[in-house]
Amino acid sequence: MTLRFYGKKTCVTCQKAKAFLEENQVAFEELPIETHPPSKAELERLVKETDVKASLNSRSAIYKAQNLGKNVPDRQTAIALMLQDPNLIKRPVIMNEQGHMIQGFDADQLTAFLKR
């Protein structure tokens, strides 16, 4: 199984997730999220209507500038903003060959995801 790993070299959470995958000998293709972000179709599968905020990177400049913590955009607006500025996407985004995706890093959640 080869995963797609959308991340950023300077992202500590991405570094932890990569180390976890490497320690567990999981093959993955690393894609820099700034230049190779998830597609619109992938973001539409990833961003949940019921929890848009969970897919937003609260440390990004656009998140802070637009106060998206309090003014959470609707799903389509959030996806449009993510396409304009991939740094708004919570990292890492990990996608398996079936197109299932997970965001962020939690060892237990990632272990369960890998068993899918």
Image (cartoon, grey):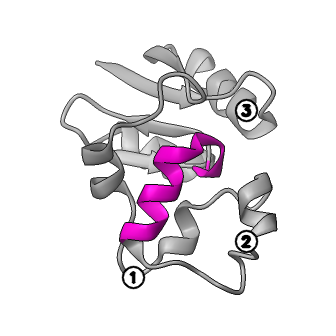
Which numbered mark, 2 or 1, is in the foreground of this view? Answer: 2
- Kindly report the distance in space between the C-alpha atoms of the residues bearing marks 2 and 1: 20 Å
Q: What segment is highlighted magenta in the picture?
A: 76-90
Residue at 30% from the left image edge and 32% from the top image edge: 96
Which numbered mark, 3 or 2, is in the foreground of this view? Answer: 2
In the image, residue 33 lies at what x, y percent? 56, 30
Residue at 72% from the left image edge and 64% from the top image edge: 63
> Which tag, 3 or 1, sits closer to the chain's start?
3
Q: Which residue is mark 2?
A: 66
The residue type indicated by label 1 comes to Thr
Res. 16 mark: 3
| Residue 33 is a magenta residue | no
Residue at 74% from the left image edge and 62% from the top image edge: 58
- Mark 2, secondary structure of its residue: loop
Q: Which residue is mark 1?
A: 50
Magenta stretch mostly in which secondary structure?
helix
- Kindly report the distance in space between the C-alpha atoms of the residues bearing marks 3 and 1: 27 Å
Q: Residues within 10 Å of mark 2 (few under 14, many from 20)?
A: few
Q: Are marks 3 and 2 in contact (CB under 8 Å)?
A: no
Residue at 67% from the left image edge and 56% from the top image edge: 57
Which numbered mark, 3 or 1, is in the foreground of this view? Answer: 1
> In the figure, is residue 11 to the left or right of 98?
right
| Residue 83 is a magenta residue | yes
Which corner quadrant of the image does residue 49 belong to?
bottom left
